[in-house]
Every structure is written in structure tokens, then in C-alpha cells.
């Protein structure tokens, strides 16, 4: 089981932040397209950094503590997942702070427009709805 | 380049991107710093586990030496760069969707953002 150590740390991060999505209505996973688009530049830069660091010997991994699955460049699968999990947790935190405090983050729609992904009423969904309504939302334009 | 140099460059790059390239200016907002204060605590814990248990091992020649919760101080810079870069892009994509989607098309928001 020890080879799952690294993955266990990542699983802990995901489990620890899951209540933010489920209880605070952060709608990070729900906005999957925006999330995926965000992760592309993050992966591009940090995987490149990681590959350089691994090649230069800046850091190494305990073979007994990782899955052993290596991607091109000897990048452990665990590391790739790190660069997905930690950004997701960071975004969840930001959105949780926004849900609780209502502070602006700079992506609010211009006045008079409902926020993307939110009902025309403007308030973030905080009732745990999954954002997959696909129903007639917005039909009346508010 | 050493990890120290790369980490400093990473922070500089993330700051430049946020303030001037993406113009998300998250670094000027309270929501960013409160979020980061929360994130950094858990980052130190996760990093502490990864380095304290020797899952990730650092080359002493590539770091300055001081450590926080087992992890090299450079990890703080690495983490800050990653969080800033991530959140800036998250806001950038959100802002782009907010500006592009007129109210009349919000029924498609989950697809268009």
C-alpha cells in the first residue's frame, strides 16, 4: 500500500475540499469547461517546470511511495495529478471565500447581466444544485 | 538554473501575468489574499507530508537550505506561483465569458463559459 502514499495525499486534498462544492455551492466542478480551460495553461507551465526539475535532479521521488507509472520525461503519474488536484483545490477555496463573503474577484458580469452559470437572479446557487439544470433557465431573460 | 532561481522566476512570471498580461489584477484584491492565506496553510501540510515522509526528496545543491514544515522555502514560492497562475486564469476565463455572453443567451451559460 505504501506506493499509494503520494496518491493518498492528493485524495486527502480532494476529499477535504469536496464539501466546498457540495455545501457552499462553489460550482467549480459544475463549470467543467471553464475549469478545463484553466487547467490547460497550469499544466503547460508546471509540467514543463517539473520535467526540467526532474531532468536537472532538483527533486526525486521515493520509488516505494509513488504508483510507479511514469509518463514521458520520467514524469510520475502522481506528479501530473498533483498539478490537477492542487489547482482545483485552490479554485474551490477562492470560490468558497466568494460564496461566504461575497467579495468581487474581477469576473463579475457588467451591470444588468446575469453572471454566466448563475440564475438570472444573480445570487450564486447555494443549495447544492449541481448546475446541470439544462432547463428553461433564462428563457424569460429575468 | 537552481530551484531557487526558477522559483523566483515563477513568482515574477505569475505576478506579471496577473497584473499586466491577463490583467486580472487578483493580487490587488482582498479575495485573493484571504484565499491564499487559507490555501497556504493546507499547502504547507500537504507539502510537509510529501517531504517529511520522503516521498519527494530535494537535491541540496538546488535549494538554499532553510525549510518550513520539512519543505524547502522555495516550495512556498513555487506554490504561490502556481496558485496565482491558476486563479488568474480561472478569473480570466470567467471574465471573458461574462463579457461575451449577452443576457439573452444565458440559457447556454454552462456550455459557453
Image (tube, rainbow, N blue to C red):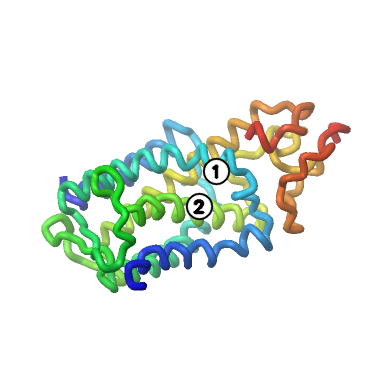
Image location of residue B106, percent across then percent down: 75, 32
Quadrant of the image containing the C terminus of chain B: top right
The residue depicted at 44 percent of the width and 55 percent of the height is: A86
The residue depicted at 54 percent of the width and 65 percent of the height is: A15
Residue found farthest to the left: B61
Quadrant of the image containing the N terminus of chain B: top left
Q: Is residue B96 above or below residue A123?
A: above
Please state which of residues B52 and A120 is positioned toward the viewer in this rendering: B52
Q: Can residue B16 be seen in this view?
A: yes
| Residue A113: quadrant of the picture | top right
Q: In this view, does A121 lie above or below A140?
A: below
Image location of residue B99, percent across then percent down: 64, 29
The residue depicted at 62 percent of the width and 44 percent of the height is: A31
Q: Can residue B8 be seen in this view?
A: no
Q: Name the residue under label 1.
A: A35
**Label 1 secondary element:** helix
Pick whichever of labels 2 and 1 is earlier in the sequence: 1
Q: Are marks 2 and 1 on the same chain?
A: yes
Count of numbered marks: 2
Q: Mark 2 points at which residue?
A: A88
Please state which of residues A136 and A95 is positioned toward the viewer in this rendering: A136
Please state which of residues A74 and B83 is positioned toward the viewer in this rendering: A74
Image location of residue B84, percent across then percent down: 43, 47
Amino acid at each position: 500500500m505504501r506506493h499509494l502514499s503520494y496518491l493518498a495525499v492528493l485524495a486527502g486534498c480532494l476529499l477535504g475540499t469536496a464539501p466546498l462544492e457540495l455545501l457552499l455551492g462553489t460550482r467549480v466542478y459544475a463549470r467543467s469547461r471553464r475549469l478545463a480551460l484553466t487547467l490547460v495553461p497550469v499544466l503547460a507551465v508546471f509540467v514543463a517546470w517539473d520535467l526540467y526539475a526532474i531532468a536537472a535532479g532538483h527533486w526525486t521521488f521515493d520509488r516505494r511511495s509513488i504508483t510507479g507509472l511514469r509518463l514521458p520525461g520520467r514524469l510520475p503519474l502522481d506528479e501530473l495529478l498533483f498539478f490537477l488536484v492542487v489547482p482545483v483545490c485552490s479554485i474551490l477555496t477562492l470560490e468558497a471565500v466568494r460564496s461566504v463573503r461575497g467579495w468581487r474577484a474581477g469576473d463579475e458580469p457588467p451591470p444588468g447581466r446575469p453572471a454566466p452559470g448563475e440564475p438570472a437572479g444573480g445570487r450564486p446557487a447555494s443549495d447544492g444544485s449541481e448546475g446541470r439544470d439544462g432547463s428553461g433557465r433564462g428563457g424569460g431573460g429575468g | 538554473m537552481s530551484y531557487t532561481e526558477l522559483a523566483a522566476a515563477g513568482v515574477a512570471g505569475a505576478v506579471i501575468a496577473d497584473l499586466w498580461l491577463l490583467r486580472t489584477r487578483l493580487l490587488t484584491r482582498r479575495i485573493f489574499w484571504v484565499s491564499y492565506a487559507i490555501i497556504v496553510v493546507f499547502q504547507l501540510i500537504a507539502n510537509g507530508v510529501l517531504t517529511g515522509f520522503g516521498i519527494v526528496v530535494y537535491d541540496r545543491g538546488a535549494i538554499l537550505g532553510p525549510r518550513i514544515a520539512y519543505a524547502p522555502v522555495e516550495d512556498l514560492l513555487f506554490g504561490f506561483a502556481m496558485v496565482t497562475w491558476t486563479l488568474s486564469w480561472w478569473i480570466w476565463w470567467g471574465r471573458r465569458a461574462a463579457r461575451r455572453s449577452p443576457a439573452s443567451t444565458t440559457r447556454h451559460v454552462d456550455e459557453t463559459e
